[in-house]
Amino acid sequence: MRLTMLSPSSEGQDISEIRDRNGERLKLFKRPLAYYFENKFVITEDRAYFVPYRREIDWPIMRDLLMEIFDLDDPEVYKEVKDRFSEGRVILGYYYPKTGHVTIIFPEEWSRYIERRIEEVFIK
């Protein structure tokens, strides 16, 4: 497998920078940040990535988040990520710290794998 992914070094520490729609700097974190209104997330087999943001101020585009995590310009990586999506091994969604609510936007159908990964990431 030739996936290129970022490696978070410690809980809560930012692991990358991406830009929001206005070109403002956003950071990618290993864990959600509670003081933001929402956190977009990508969960893979072995890591979770969170981008905290305030809905009324800025919100990152999910495609930009995925491109920051995976080297989608590499055709082999793109194919591997596409296969992972089709198998439901990449989970996209939102986390609302104020309520503790998690919304999964992809995959559309839940499986035991998805339930287990959500528990591992959010219930630890």
Image (cartoon, rainbow, N blue to C red):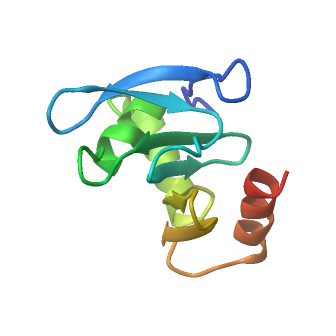
Is 115 located above or below residue 54 in the figure? below
Q: Is residue 121 left or right of residue 69?
A: right
Tell me residue 37's x, y (percent).
44, 53
**Image spot of residue 88 (x, y percent):** 59, 65
Rendered image quadrant of residue 55: bottom left
Quadrant hosting residue 24 = top left
Left or right relative to 14: residue 78 = left
The residue at the point 52 percent across, 50 percent down is 41
Considering every residue shown, the one lying at the far bottom of the view is 109
Determine if residue 89 is in view: yes
Q: Is residue 46 above or below residue 29?
A: below
Residue at point 45%, 54% (across, down): 38
Q: Nearer the viewer, residue 81 or 22?
A: 22
Front residue of this view, candidates 17 and 91:
17
Question: Is residue 71 something that shows in the picture?
Answer: no
- How many numbered marks have been drawn onto this rendered protein structure? 0
Q: Position of residue 113 (x, y in %)?
A: 76, 67
Quarter of the picture containing the N terminus is: top right
Name the residue: 55% across, 21% down: 15
Decide: is 68 above or below 60: above
Q: Is residue 14 above or below residue 1?
A: above
Identify the residue at image location x=69%, y=39%: 47
Image position, residue 109 (x, y; %): 57, 81
Q: Nearer the viewer, residue 94 or 69?
A: 94
Outermost residue on the left side: it is 22
